[in-house]
Image (cartoon, rainbow, N blue to C red):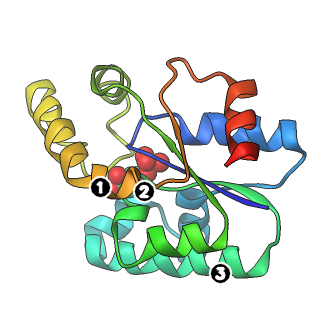
Amino acid sequence: MKIFLIGFMGSGKTHWGRLLSEKLGMRFFDLDEQVTEHAGRPIAEIFATDGEEHFRLLEKEVLYILTESHDNFVMACGGGSPCYFNNIEYMKQSGTTVWINTPLDTLFERLVNEKDKRPLIKDLSGEQLKGFIGKKFADRKIYYEQADVTVDEEPVQLEQLIEKIFHA
Ligand code: S3P
């Protein structure tokens, strides 16, 4: 079984992905970490040196490599990953996609303190970040809502999350 956790930056994909993988006894991948490992440099540096387009190509490449080479895993996907190329279709064909749909004000509260390692928001003021989240979320929603499972509970309930995934 291949489980892809998707959702906006700050929605808790890595946190819940780790817990989910431990509970299910499955391997955990963090796509951002895997891209960093594959490229041999941090995401912020990839953005700064080669630009976002290059990062999106790398992200797709690593998504495909991991998905093709493992039968069972939980993957925390980068916030933009389902929104480029045909990645969302690919994830859906390969396994079960789960959207962690965190309220926008919660995203803001988390991201305002965690901007530094995220190149898309690192230079934004608080007000700008609020605007960015609203606009980007509106652009990306059409991808996120294609997920097989949507989790709206805040905070996420692990048992409910598991039940939803197995009934998808
Ligand atoms: C991005 C989200 C980040 C990372 C990169 C771009 C995005 O992942 O992939 O900074 O476009 O939303 P997280 O969602 O894990 O922060």
Tell which tag, 3 or 2, sits nearer the viewer: 2
Q: Which residue is mark 1?
A: 142
> Element type at marker 3?
helix
| Disc 1 and disc 2 in contact, CB within 8 angstroms | yes
The image shows residue 105 at horizontal and vertical percentages of 28, 20
In the structure shown, which secondary structural element does the residue marked by tag 1 occupy?
A: helix
Judging depth in this view, the residue of 132 and 51 nearest the camera is 132
| Vertical placement of residue 108 versus 14, above or below | above
How far, Cα to Cα, is label 1 from label 2? 7 Å
Question: Where, by quadrant of the figure, is residue 45 drawn?
Answer: bottom left
According to the picture, the residue beneath numbered tag 3 turns out to be 65
Q: Identity of the amino acid at label 3?
A: Ile
Determine the residue positioned at 38% across, 31% down.
114
Judging depth in this view, the residue of 133 and 101 nearest the camera is 101
Look at the image and tell me whether residue 59 can be seen.
Answer: no
Disc on res. 146: 2
Local secondary structure at mark 2: loop
Q: CA distance from mark 3 to mark 1?
A: 25 Å
Mark nearer the N terminus (3 vs 1): 3
Name the residue at the front extreme.
167
Where 159 sits versus 46, above or below?
A: above
Which three-letter amino acid code belongs to the residue tagged 1? Ile
7 relative position to 105: left or right: right
The mark nearer the N terminus, 3 or 2, is 3
